Image (cartoon, coloured by chain):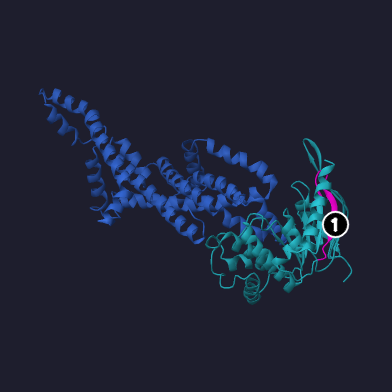
Amino acid sequence: MNNPVISANKLSLTYQTNDGPVHALQDINLDIKKGEFVSFIGPSGCGKTTLLRVIAELETPTNGTIQVNGMSASEARMQRAYGYVFQAAGLYPWRTIGGNIKLPLEIMGYSKEQREERVAHVLELVELSGFDKKFPWQLSGGMQQRASIARALAFDADILLMDEPFGALDEIVRDHLNEQLLKLWARTQKTIGFVTHSIPEAVFLSTKIVVMSPRPGRIANIIESTLPRDRSLDIRESQEFLDIAAEVRDGLRTGHADE
Amino acid sequence: MNKLRFFWHKMGPVVTVLLVIIAIWYVATVWLNSAWAYDKAKRADTTISFSQMVSDTMIQDKPLLPAPHQIIKEIYKTTVLKKVTSKRSLIWHGWITLSATLLGFAFGTTFGILLAIGIVYSRAMDMSVMPWVITSQTIPILAVAPMIIVVLNAVGISGLLPKAIISMYLSFFPVVVGMVKGLRSPDQMQIDQMRTWSASKNSSFWKLRLPSSMPYLFASLKIGIAASLVGAIVGELPTGAVAGLGARLLAGSYYGQTIQIWSALICAAILAASLVAIIGTIEKYTLRRMGIQL
């Protein structure tokens, strides 16, 4: 239980470009424990998405080590240790919602019965039951993103990585989806890594907030949230919420000060 | 009433253009064939009026430019009035050309798709094959066709196959180019997504790349089938004018049978248009089923 699910040690990533090296990540040390909801927040270019991609082995660090489930990131990816939700829903237009959710299951070789069963289960989790026969274009943007979350949940990965999944949606839909996501997290007990650039979103969702600063991308502050795990949107009016939000904002400011 | 209006809305522009072409055609017929009409009158030591000249240009046996109704009459005579087994039937000749076209198209499409897969998945093939594919199309088909016929004949292959190979030579090219682009059309996010599922190359091909390439494939097939028909006709020219629309064209030009040439040409055009239309229909149906809105 005490072993971290994700553990980064002195992680750095440098891109070689024509204008010289770009330090996307520098000296990242981070432990994420099982069942935590961790948000990565910071201005654009701070490496929050890059860090998430390194965890998913979509990028390879130039220095340091990263461990996922006690394995290297590469082994973890091979064993399908995580579900990844991208900024865009990325559903295939030629597949129904059910067909889209089945896609990773087909690739991973689940049997037909298992596929049917899991589609029904995850659609229920994201409150889209009855939509499995619909095509993506028949759904709103918010519903499409929920379907893409369902797809990431369909196989047995206990880590869920989300890269600004609600970034393209309006605030009302976003609030609703945030609340749903918390419920889903409570039911499934997954460990979640969540990239965002919204302070209220980060504070509302997370048990741990990683504040990052740009050039070079590094961690400015890690804030452990004192809010209870079971929370509703009303909590955003509480003093405790505002205090944490202020702390995040402070972290973002210090990160920017030495630019 | 509404139905009629809808029909006119769709067909109106096409019919208008057709009528304009036919009008220009008749004017050109009179203009081009008038010399022969006057010539004939001069040799008979008579003079003809303008209206006599005009009516003569419409009924000549070997006109420079046959009038549209002469061609229609000839096509009617050689399709409806002839048995399809007759060597004078355009349907018989058309079928011979069509079978070579379809076989060549099938070869060309298969070969084109296989080449595209090779180019997309192998860097070495990407670097080495593509320049040759492009070079192959810069050589005039008229120069290559007789050689293919002769060489294959020497090894005992004749008839349908050599023509189909010439057809293939023309039709694989648009398929390669379209499919390379189509198979590469998935964006970085979709490829990353496959990676997060640790998908095999096989899965990403069948589930992502191939379906994504469908709109590109159909665009290529439409060009490919028309090119196939051209290839089949060109393939019929050096075979000594035995059979097929190409043979009809060649025989017509040997004997100055302009009406026969034009009716074969028109038949080839109708055939090409029908083939492209059939592919267009399959395309519409397939892409709509795939949820891709055109």
Is B109 on the left or on the right of B187, as rendered?
Answer: left
Residue B5, percent across and down? 28, 52
Closer to the camera in the image, B123 or A128: A128
Which residues are drawn in magenta?
Answer: A212-226
A98 lies above or below A214: below
Q: Which residue is labeled 1 in the image?
A: A222
Q: Is residue B276 magenta?
A: no
On the picture, is B61 further left or further right than A119? left
Query: Chain in cyan?
Result: A
Membership of A215 in magenta stretch: yes
Protein chain holding label 1: A
Which is nearer the eye, B181 or A95?
A: A95
The picture's colour for chain B is blue
Q: Looking at the picture, which amino acid does disc 1 mark?
A: Ile
Examine the rendering and report whether any part of residue A57 can be seen: no
Question: Where on the picture, by quarter, is residue B84?
Answer: bottom left
The quadrant of the picture occupied by the N terminus of chain B is bottom left
Predominant secondary structure in magenta? Answer: strand
Image coordinates of residue B46 in percent, x first then y, are 10, 24
Q: Residues within 10 Å of mark 1 (few under 14, many from 20)?
A: some
Q: In the orientation shown, which residue stands out farthest toward the left?
A: B46
Residue B237: x and y in percent read 40, 41
Residue B122, percent from left and from top: 68, 49
Is residue A235 in view? yes
